[in-house]
Image (cartoon, grey):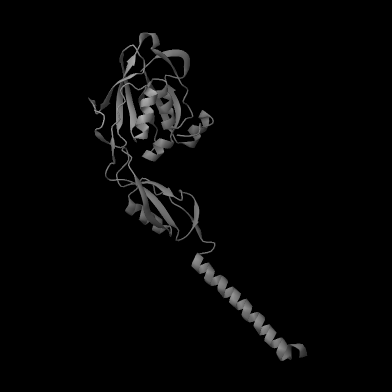
């Protein structure tokens, strides 16, 4: 007790108490400012309007900012195309979520001249312009898969014409009777766009894309996996230009039954 009554010891004890109080106060203030330990899962803001995305984010204690835009022809204009961080990511409250939206006005691109290209070359050129290959229409010719005409909305389109980005272009291509057969690839387990690409690369057309009830949005369709195809993959050759129908889903149980999913889109 005599030691505690010593003024030097008393001052040291008060100094320790004061320092501890400062540390505790600093930690409390820092926790309030940084919301230490308060994390939330980022909600899925895709495929809704910017206003709706802002409301959903606000309800979760988050903020949104439109960072960029793209143009996806099949998607609702003005809807959120993608977000960063992605849905499900754990972040601190108050975090700003960057949104990429689907532009309300389509970007215009110049239609290239594909005549004389092979189908593969034409596909690559279309992709570089933000365009998509639609149907391949085969006509008798000495050179198989040589592009003879390019069509947009069932009419021939001239090179140099301005066309909406994301549009689909059909091609008229040659078909020689000596090179008129091809094999049907096995696209089960592939995501939608990769499956389409594989089928077109084998000089075949897409008949129908049959999405089940699990596919509700455009983003879902891109992530959908091929469950079945008709006709199925076979060693027996099929006539070039024939159609292949795909059944797709994002249902985890259905996808698991197909086997390992091929990576990529």
Whole-percent x and y of residue 70? 34, 44
Q: Nearer the viewer, residue 56 or 146?
A: 146
Q: Nearer the viewer, residue 255 or 242?
A: 242
Q: Is residue 171 left or right of residue 64?
A: left
Q: Nearer the viewer, residue 85 or 164?
A: 164
Q: Residue at x 32, y 54 (%)?
A: 51
Q: Quadrant of the C terminus?
A: top left
Q: Residue at x 43, y 37 (%)?
A: 223
Whole-percent x and y of residue 32? 50, 68
- Residue 14, placed above or below residue 26: below
Q: How many marks?
A: 0
- Residue 14, placed above or below residue 85: below
Q: Residue 207, located in which quarter of the rendered image?
A: top left
Asked if residue 150 can be seen in this view, the reply is yes
Q: Residue at x 36, y 15 (%)?
A: 144
- Residue 101, placed above or below residue 180: below
Q: Residue 196, located in which quarter of the rendered image?
A: top left
Whole-percent x and y of residue 54? 36, 55
Residue that sits furthest to the top in the current view: 178
Whole-percent x and y of residue 2? 77, 90
Q: Residue at x 42, y 15 (%)?
A: 182
């Amino acid at each position: 007790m005599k030691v505690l009554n010593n003024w030097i010891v008393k001052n040291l004890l008060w100094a320790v108490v004061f320092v501890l109080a400062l540390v505790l106060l600093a930690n409390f203030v820092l926790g309030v400012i940084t919301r230490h330990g308060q994390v939330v899962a980022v909600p899925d803001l895709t495929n809704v309007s910017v206003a709706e995305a802002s409301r959903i984010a606000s309800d979760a204690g988050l903020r949104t900012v439109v960072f960029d835009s793209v143009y996806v022809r099949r998607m609702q204009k003005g809807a959120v195309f993608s977000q960063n961080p992605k849905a499900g990511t754990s972040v601190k409250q108050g975090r700003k979520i960057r949104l990429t939206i689907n532009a309300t006005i389509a970007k215009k691109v110049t239609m290239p001249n594909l005549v004389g290209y092979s189908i593969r070359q034409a596909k690559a050129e279309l992709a570089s312009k933000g365009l998509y290959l639609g149907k391949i229409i085969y006509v008798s010719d000495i050179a198989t898969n040589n592009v003879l005409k390019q069509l947009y909305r069932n009419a021939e389109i001239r090179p140099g014409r301005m066309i909406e980005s994301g549009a689909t272009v059909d091609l008229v291509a040659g078909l020689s009777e000596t090179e008129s057969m091809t094999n049907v690839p096995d696209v089960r387990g592939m995501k939608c766009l990769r499956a389409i690409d594989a089928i077109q690369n084998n000089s075949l057309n897409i008949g129908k894309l049959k999405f089940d009830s699990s596919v509700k949005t455009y983003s879902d369709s891109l992530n959908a996996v091929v469950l079945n195809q008709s006709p199925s993959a076979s060693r027996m050759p099929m006539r070039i230009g024939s159609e292949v129908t795909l059944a797709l889903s994002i249902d985890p149980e259905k996808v698991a039954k197909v086997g390992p999913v091929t990576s990529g889109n």
